[in-house]
Amino acid sequence: MKSYFSKNGLWQWGCFFIALLLLTSIAYAANLKLEIYLIWGTNDEKSPDPKYKRVDSELEKKLKNVFKWNHYYEIKRIKGDVRSRSTKKFEVSDKCAVEITEMEGPRVEVKLYGEGKLINKTIKSLTKGEFFTLAGDDKNETAWFVIIKLLEEN
Amino acid sequence: MITQEQKLKLQAYLDGELGWFEARKIRKLIATDREAEQLFNELKAIRKLTRQNEPEYRLNMSREQYWSKIERAITTDPLTQEQESLLTHLSALFLMYQRAVVSVAVAILVLLTGYFIINSKPVEDYLVIIENTSEEIGSFSFRSQSENMFVVWIYNKDNPEASNSLPYNDELMFQ
């Protein structure tokens, strides 16, 4: 037992523990794989722009269960990564952008910009499969939705 | 003054260990010497007390059986030869791989500790912080458990109807 606690032995144990802790913290720091949607909600049957397609039936059902609008059109869909402890800005339209920061723990900070101006900042934990939605209403009884979905974290 | 030898003989007389001649001499000493008489009486009183107050241990078997049981327990080898050799082999193996065994045990302990730290969520993780940067903008948030959706609804304060444009749903948890 003497060798375990000799000066050299202690150094070896110290290095071993530090390496293990580093490995653990690296494993804990997550790179996020996200999917971001910009969706338009309306009660009109007709798409506001022929380029916009209806969202898939599963997402539409989900949105209908929460919001009052009958039809939802996908304006843009972005897939992107946010590396651990870093920030990335996603342009969801000409006027709208979201900036996502991966924070300590499972939390993210999401900043919503409208016409270059910071409108809202939200800090919350993001779990896989959860739909984090920033939304608001617009003219002619329509609404916009920015949906952030965590696809994977590694 | 009685001697040490006389004191011992007094005790022996009391225990009935002296021969006739010696016993006669001690009886004479007790009768003539006051100190010897006093010591004899004290010894007698002590013997009486100890005999009366000695705890009695009753065996539920015969005396011979009791002692032969103890003898068997002492003489019988607690381990068979095979068991002993297995034990020796195992302890030799442990000594040989002591470092590896201890290292693996410590590594498992550290990993388990790390796992539990990671999986224990602090309270802050459940909190949501929402900040609106403009005075004209208002917001409220709610969660739909069934759809696994968290919503931050942003509205213009100048348009009060906007905040009422959501359908009310019992399932929604406003926060």
Image: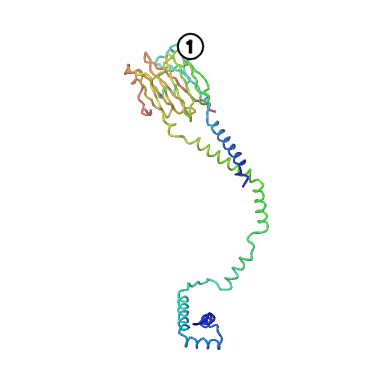
Task: Please identify the quadrant where the C terminus of chain A is shown.
Answer: top right
Residue B164 appears left or right of A9: left
Location of residue B76 in the rendering, given as x and y in whole percent from the top left corner: 64, 64
Residue that lies at the very extreme toward the front in this rendered image? B1
B120 or A150, nearer to the observer = B120
According to the picture, the residue beneath numbered tag 1 turns out to be A51
B97 w.r.t. B28: above or below: above
Residue B4 % position (x, y): 53, 79
Q: In front here: B164 or B154?
A: B154
Q: Please provide percent x and percent y for residue A27.
A: 55, 31
Asked if B36 appears above or below B61 in the picture, the reply is below
> What residue lies at 51% left-to-right and 86% top-to-bottom?
B26
* Residue placed furthest toward the top: A50
In the image, residue B42 sits, relative to residue A55, either above or below, namely: below
Q: Residue at x 53, y 24 (%)?
A: A83
Q: Chain of mark 1?
A: A
Where, by quadrant of the figure, is residue B110 drawn?
top right
At 61% from the left edge and 68% from the top edge, which residue is drawn? Answer: B71
User: Within the image, what quadrant is residue B72 found in?
Assistant: bottom right
Q: Where, by quadrant of the figure, is residue B164 drawn?
A: top left
**Which amino acid type is shown beneath numbered disc 1?**
Lys
Does residue B58 lie above or below A124 as drawn? below
- Label 1: which secondary element: loop
- x, y percent for residue A16: 59, 37
Image point 47% across, 75% down: which residue? B50
**Lateral position of residue A57 relative to residue B174, left or right:** right
